């Protein structure tokens, strides 16, 4: 068994290279070949010494995830389904916008948190992804997209850990993956353009602020414990007050940062004026201690097993207005890729029916790729790195 080099951040790769009797700076060259240029073949890494290339050939490899399918939405959103073995599949979604290209990636096959409104949650937990499987999604998407827009510039400017799984329940694999995303020799993304979304794993929020303080989104969905216990079962372990304290702690060393609270609008469940009032109250109580936040209201993407419905648009607008009038910055998320089931919380439809996945996997070799010429991409930005 040789080692998959996608499993490493730069430091990990340096240790691996030392183990081969090589100098640490070789790791930087190798890391750039893999992540900046998308190379998987050591033979092509022309500035590496021949002796190193020989060692790599016998000790290492770069393992892409087998692609099961690709769907392209009329709005340019692309969803990829990858095989992670044992009948499990995970999804990644690319969302092109005028001023950015966002990749939404998965951290686990399934999820153990079991939120009522989430189809990944209904599927249950299969396993954690490795660092290499998390990074392989970005590695594939970035270099695939560059080939199709015919550019050497970066296409993906933002990464959100909002695909399948709870990233903070896969902490040890997550952190090296985040480091590779931020590394100037890797994807060079600014820490504000990498977002970890969590249902509220309080101790890991605290650790993340020390280890790798990227942007944090917290899936709130309810303004009080009785309702949140029901929608996000993890709330029974880490109730709202502890969660708010963890958010305050996360912001303590970054005075210009804020938490994005995600709030999925469920008809008749959490979308009434009294819920908005309670939310305003919750945030204002904690603002004095240093909580800075924005709200992102997400139209619920319904699926039959949830027994829940999407709030009518007028109610979402009224809810947003109520928060805004209280001085809270609030946006309503645009739904993208609806026609290919690429929206939030829908990233499990293909996985739940495992037999279907198996048969799709069998079809893999005959898969017809949709011509990407049919899709309009926004021009990749030349300055994708914001000034910090
Ligand atoms: N586990 C993490 C990240 C993955 S879920 C978390 O829960 O934050 C990403 C986002 O999609 C979360 O805000 C989640 O609440 C939301 N989501 C899940 N199911 C949804 C659905 N059916 N409709 C709309 N948003 C949903
Ligand atoms: Fe897991 Fe997030 Fe879905 Fe909840 S919303 S079940 S935490 S993936």
Image (tube, rainbow, N blue to C red):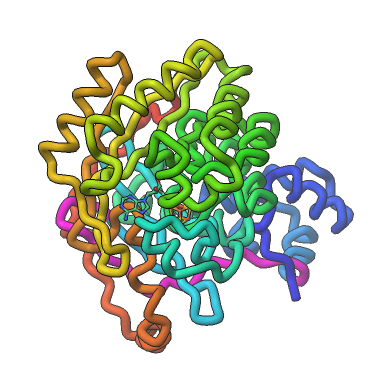
Instruction: Look at the image and say whether residue 60 sits in the magenta stretch.
Output: yes
Q: Where's residue 287, x and y in %?
A: 47, 15
Q: Pick the residue in front: 319 or 14.
A: 319
316 sits to left or right of 18: left
Q: Quadrant of residue 353?
A: bottom left
Q: Quadrant of residue 272?
A: top left
Compared with 135, 276 (above or below) is above
Quadrant holding the N terminus: bottom right
Name the residue furthest front: 226
Name the residue furthest top: 288
Residue located at (49% from left, 37% from top) = 194
Q: How many marks?
A: 0
Q: Where's residue 334, x and y in %?
A: 22, 41
Residue located at (39% from left, 21% from top) = 281
Q: Where's residue 311, x and y in %?
A: 19, 46
Q: Pick the residue in front: 5 or 235.
A: 235
Q: Quadrant of residue 206?
A: top right
Q: Pick the residue in front: 265 or 77.
A: 265
Compared with 45, 366 (above or below) is below
Q: Which residues are magenta?
A: 58-77
């Amino acid at each position: 068994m040789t080692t998959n080099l996608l499993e490493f951040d730069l430091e990990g790769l340096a240790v691996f290279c030392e183990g081969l009797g090589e100098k640490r700076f070789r790791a930087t060259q190798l890391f750039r070949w893999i992540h900046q240029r998308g190379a998987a073949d050591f033979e092509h890494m022309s500035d590496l010494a021949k002796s190193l290339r020989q060692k790599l050939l016998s000790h290492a490899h770069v393992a892409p995830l087998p692609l099961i399918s690709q769907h392209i939405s009329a709005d340019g959103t692309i969803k990829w389904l990858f095989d992670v073995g044992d009948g499990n599949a995970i999804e990644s979604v690319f969302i092109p916008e005028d001023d950015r290209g966002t990749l939404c990636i998965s951290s686990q096959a399934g999820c153990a948190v079991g939120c009522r409104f989430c189809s990944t949650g209904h599927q249950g937990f299969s396993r954690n992804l490795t660092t290499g499987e998390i990074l392989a999604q970005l590695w594939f998407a970035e270099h695939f997209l560059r080939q199709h827009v015919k550019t050497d510039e970066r296409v993906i400017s933002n990464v959100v850990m909002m695909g399948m799984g709870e990233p903070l329940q896969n902490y040890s694999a997550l952190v090296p993956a985040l480091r590779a995303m931020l590394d100037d020799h890797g994807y060079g993304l600014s820490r504000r353009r990498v977002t970890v979304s969590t249902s509220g794993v309080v101790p890991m929020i605290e650790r993340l602020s020390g280890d790798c303080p990227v942007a944090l989104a917290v899936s709130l969905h309810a303004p009080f414990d009785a309702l949140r216990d029901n929608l996000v079962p993890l709330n029974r372990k880490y109730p709202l007050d502890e969660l708010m304290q963890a958010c305050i702690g996360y912001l303590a060393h970054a005075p210009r940062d804020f938490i994005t609270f995600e709030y999925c609008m469920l008809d008749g469940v959490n979308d009434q004026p009294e819920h908005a009032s309670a939310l305003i109250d919750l945030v204002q109580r904690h603002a004095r201690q240093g909580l800075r936040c924005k709200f992102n209201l997400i139209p619920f993407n319904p699926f039959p097993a949830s027994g829940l419905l999407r709030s009518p648009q007028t109610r979402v607008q009224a809810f947003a207005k109520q928060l805004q009038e209280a001085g809270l910055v609030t946006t309503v998320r645009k739904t993208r890729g609806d026609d290919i089931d690429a929206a939030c919380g829908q990233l499990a439809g293909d996985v739940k029916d495992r037999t279907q996945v198996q048969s799709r996997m069998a079809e893999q070799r005959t898969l017809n790729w949709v011509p990407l010429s049919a899709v309009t991409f926004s021009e990749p930005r030349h300055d994708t790195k914001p000034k910090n």
